[in-house]
Amino acid sequence: MIWVLYRQRLRRDRWQLISWILSIGVLAWFAVEAIGKTFGDEASRAQVLQLATATPAILVLRGLARGPQLDAFTFFEIFSFIALLAALMNTFMAVRHTRAEEESGRSELVSSTSAGRWTPLVTTIVHGLVADVLVAVATALGFMGGGLDPAGSIVAGLATGAVGFAFLGVGLLAGEFFSTSRGANGISSAVVMIAYLLRGFGDATGQVSTDGMTVTAAWPSWISPIGWGQQTFAYTGNRLWPLLLPLALAAVCIAAVVGLMERRDVGASVLAGRAGRPDAGPTLRGPFSLAFRLQQGSIIGWCVGGLATGILTGSLGSAIQASITSSPQVTSILRAMVEAQGTSMTQLLVAALFEIAGILAAACGLQAVIRLRQEEAAGTAELVLSRPLGRARWLGSFLGLGAVSMVLVMLFTALGAWISLVASGDTSSAVGDVWQTAIDQLPAALIYLSLPAAVFVVWPRATIAAGWALLGVGVVLGIYGGMLGFDQKVRDISPFTHTPVTTGAGTDWSGGFWMLGIAVVLALIALVAVRRREVGTA
Amino acid sequence: MDTVIQTVDLHKNFGRVRALDGLDLEVRSGEIHGFLGPNGAGKSTTLRILLGLARASSGSATVLGRNPWTDAVELHRRVASVPGDVNIWPNLTGGETIDLLSRLRGSTLDRAYKERKRHLSEIFDFDPSKRGRAYSKGNRQKVALIAALVTDAELYLFDEPTSGLDPLMEAVFTREVRRVTRENGATVLLSSHILSEVEQLADRVSIIRSGKIVDGGTLDALRHLTRTEISFAQDSVDTHALATLSQVHDLTVTDGRVKFGADSDRVHEVLPLLGNLGVKGLLVSPPSLEELFLRHYGDTVAPAAEAADDGDSHHRRHRAAAQTGA
């Protein structure tokens, strides 16, 4: 019985899983190659590492420094990102095979056979376990393929797989609480992001060794599964016991899932949908308010993400100041860096972390366009468009909402940063700059509103896949492109590469204006072309 | 009489599939027009073109004197519609959905509107305070029906409006459709694959098959084409007299029952004889579209696109052969 359902899951997920797992493996391999090329000798890596440990902003996006050897340095650079990918793969997989199935009613079909209520859950766990073993193998092979030590590579692989499996449990548990897959995916993605940021915060505020080569993580890393994976000290310590923690978390989550499923009906959820109002409120009156109503959940989610990023940015600002005063060596490195850039440390930090918030804003806007496609595929677009409402106005309303939600996400990011900077007593110009830096992120993000909109008009079926793929490519090229050693011309493809950076000397918006122009042109093309397009069905 | 809907040589291709293949449809003002055809014949495609949601590949369509593709927005102020496959927003309640759709049509939710909505919810036995995801298919259908009927329109386009409704609700729908034509002089185009449903409501019908209108006219004209199936317990009834009647066709005896088809417009002529024979367990089944198609178009109009339909015909032919054998 498990075998039958397992084959169904394999068949349904084969391309998706293959691409997740291959991406993770290739990324590991690529990272070793790129780092070997860029920082060939140990001296240059040591220099970078010293800079990094003195610059918490870098640590947030990298990991736990464990020395300048190529293998340890690679683990430091890429592990947290690989673990993040593995985590997302697992939460999406868990929700796809549990809550999404229940929401669509398909689980009724399956559960009314001899499979019963439990086999689908067990099969999903097996499915996840196998996928995570493959992730572990792919990661280990990727690192080994780059020429790193096999033992350490296997530890790194196991760490990735174990972190992934912990999030399978998180995804399953999220599915118990929400009646929709959207809600479950939203909350479990948020947990993944929080885990990433917590370990970032822990690493950035950790104890730096006197030579600046290693960091001992502070406590926040110890409440993050991704942080647990880092604690294996692959290549330098090769300890496996920290992996008991993610496995234990998975076990606890699964036990909770079993306990909850014991008590609930198929299709029901812990947070039940309430009975609603029989009449529409005065605000639900047109396509824009409909779009808002449909998107409000995810907008709130992304805004909370922005706020968290902002608060993190601000509190790191104070952490930096603490480290400056405590270590004279760090101070000199920072001074050198700051003077070279003509920018305050906090400003650099804000610019770097707000790029992450820019991605959140882009994703939030992208979801508004994806909603258009979902409306069309579900048939609800037809209901609206057989009313006196032009297609351009319909599309425009969703684009408008997407733009507004992007601004909201950046606003909350800036607000979070502002509050925590002010609270930490930071009086540098960065406090004022957070608003400017937030606005700086909008041109690149807006591309992810109008480019998918153009795709939606021209090739509706591709909207969702193309939207996320374009965002993924943009993030990899624009934000990790430098680290992965891509040519500047390739990196220039990404909108995020052209994000204006606010420095002490002001803001260079030349790239920003280009991005804005392109976004506007693409949006106009979409608005004109949609008038000539039929309303699709599925 | 004015023509409300007119299509001339309407074609619609999806890639290499011809959904509409020269459709000529005419609907006159104030009538209830039945649009009959099996699944996949092109009914929904036609209605989507009439609503300006899809564009014709060639040919012309006119709705209320305008081009539905270019003048969709203006037309939609005057047209109410129910799609063939009703899907609603899972996180909006039924009541919210109805109100939103009405506001999109430009109506203000005044007291008269609220009263109509309450009345329709009541007669359709519909709870508007549930969320969309909680509704069954029939209840989703009611959302679309109430949203279409709650505001006045000159033209109503219904695509298989009673699918998912129970017979009681079908009767409510029938009454409401009669009301809008009688009270407001509205025109109704109603698609269906069930002959008896259209028979109850329609003044005229058009029969579509493989993207073409193959027959049409008043219901009386249609009755010439259809046969009513009559059966009764065989017991020891002598059926020879029946078999000689000209309005009786294909008389068979299977599993202890006598079965025959009678011309639908001449059923009454057969009834006295049945009375005289004192038959028991009499069953009169209304003519079905499938039977009509089988007899009239079974082998002549059978494109590859309609595999499902063909399968059905083969099955029936097979069964008919078996009965003859017995």
Image: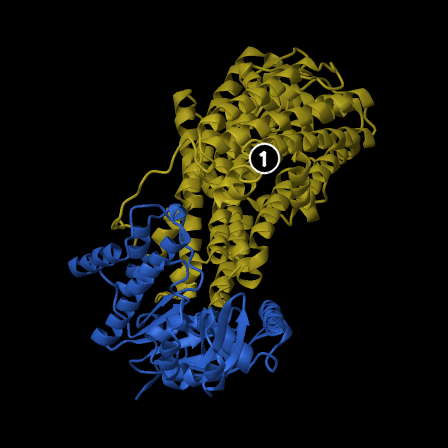
Chain colours: A yellow, B blue
Q: Residue furthest left?
A: B111
- What is the three-letter code of the residue carrying label 1? Pro
Q: Chain of mark 1?
A: A
**Image position of B192 (left or right of A34):** left
Disc 1 packing (10 Å; few <14; some 14–19; many ≥20): many
Q: Check the picture and name the quadrant holding the C terminus of chain B.
A: bottom right
| Residue B290 in the image, given as x and y percentages of width and height | 51, 73
Asked if one can make out residue A393 in the rendered structure from this viewpoint, the answer is no
Q: Quadrant of residue B5?
A: bottom left
Q: Nearer the viewer, residue A500 or B182?
A: B182
| Residue A429 in the image, given as x and y percentages of width and height | 44, 30
| Residue A371 in the image, given as x and y percentages of width and height | 47, 51
Q: In the rendered image, which residue does mark 1 sit on? A: A120
Residue at 29% across, 46% down: B129
Q: Quadrant of residue A117?
A: top right
Residue at 43% across, 49% down: A403
